[in-house]
Image (cartoon, rainbow, N blue to C red):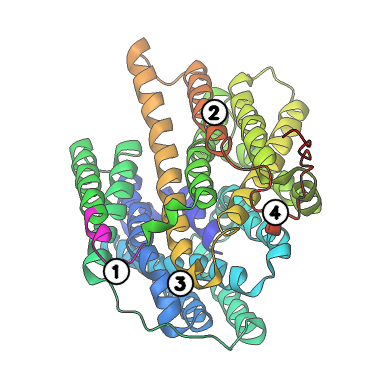
Amino acid sequence: MEQMDSTVISTSLPAIAADIGTSPIALKLALTAYLVSLAVFIPVSGWMADRFGAKNVFRAAIVVFVLGSIACAVSNSLLAFVVSRFLQGVGGAMMTPVGRLVLVRSTPRNELVGAMAWLTMPALIGPLLGPPVGGFLTTYFSWHWIFLINVPIGIIGIWFATRYLPSVETLVRRPLDVIGFFLSGIAASGVVFGLSVVSLPALPSWIGFTTLAVGILSTILYLLHARNKPEPLLALDLFKNQVFRASIVGGSLFRIGVGAVPFLLPLMFQIGFGMTPFQSGMITFVSALGAMSMKLVTKWFYAKTGFRNSLMYGSVVAAGFIAVNGLFTPATPYWLMIVLLLAGGFFRSLFFTGTNALAYADIPNEQTSQATPISSVAQQISIALGVAVAGGILEVSTKLHGGPLQLSDFHIAFFIVAAVSGLACLSFRGLRADAGAEVSGHRPLIKAASPAE
């Protein structure tokens, strides 16, 4: 629900803007408001789960998200819609990270890869389902239904959470790092908001660069604050763990390319190929099928190859499939594009399942509530950075040739973001061959030492 909702609105912006009496460009503030809300409240999600119980926070987050959805559906002005999206973001900021936290705490380590495979699929399928679903509901019903559909989904989610999530939890009453909350919120929201404005300008670009600078400055201040705080909101000491560090850094680098693909591919199909939004959505949708098929082999694959080799070489292969998009032309057969997008979705999903599971491989259960918000913040920033990088490449490319967007501009963008994603392999080179073996089930063959050795 949360992953699809974050992208479904993009297709419906013109219809919503016309109905509430504003412009689609101005309405992009609603997209930004949602991202800012996520960035502000994700860092405190781990503390909330420890203080009030993950199950309780998860259910409350669904309620807040559904209330925000209803508020969006009944909004009749730009201000009301932006505020409603911000409320939705408060729910989303707690819902997804706390849901992941519940999953990690309640799953045996040797089953975590399989569980993460299920958790990874919505993150990859949601953004691909969003545009066609949003277009269908807006075209054949009304834009209000893209939000009202969340009501029955949310009710079902609350029922399942009440029925199946574990109730017995040890509450941790650690004090809230208030200064850390404000600094981390300003840092993450400043970076995400700045990148969003720079890449999708609904406001003057100087506002984007200013907020980005404020976000970077706040990040530095938070780092200084966390060094002297016994229990900081985001426990940066976790980065001393090589396995956790490799997962966050490598996953973030790769997500820059993945964040760019849903932005670049539909634009290329519509501007460069002349497709309709619906035709474009139906082709890009096949990546979701590839992501779903990944579930069938994930656990076996990581048990056979281990995290180190799978992620090091898998990141290069998956980045290669991002680069392949830069070879598409209107003359490329549809069946070939579909096959390549299907394979790309499979390998991206396989990679993300591994990095998500690896993040918790060496983290004790009592520290998972601190690892989860760090992982979630890194994901949000890297995806926003991916869209910003892609938008920046297109803008620079058009200025260089002095004309409107051309197909070659998209090709250049795909090659560059693929190269950035490929750099993720460097983060996994230093890992031991048996890194995360308790989670992956991989037991590498180790050469026995000779008597002379």
Question: Does 253 sit left or right of 391 as displayed?
Answer: right
Q: What is the distance, in whole Å, between disc 2 and disc 3 at their CAs?
A: 34 Å
Provide the residue span drawn in magenta.
224-234
The dot on residue 418 is 2
Q: Which of marks 4 and 1 is nearer the N terminus?
A: 1
On the image, the x and y values in percent for residue 112 come to 68, 62
From the viewer's perspective, is residue 92 above or below residue 191?
below
Mark sitting on residue 329: none
Q: Which residue is drawn at 69% across and 35% down?
A: 341
Residue topped by disc 3:
65
The answer to whether residue 135 is visible is: yes
Residue type, numbered disc 3: Phe
The numbered dot on residue 437 is: 4
Mark 1 belongs to which amino acid? Pro
Q: Which amino acid does label 4 sit on?
A: Ala
> Image height check: is 269 above or below 75?
above
Q: Which of 122 and 394 is in front in this view?
A: 122
Question: Which residue, given by chain and number where applicable, does mark 1 sit on?
Answer: 230
User: Mark 4: few, some, or many residues within 10 Å (few <14, many ≥20)?
Assistant: many
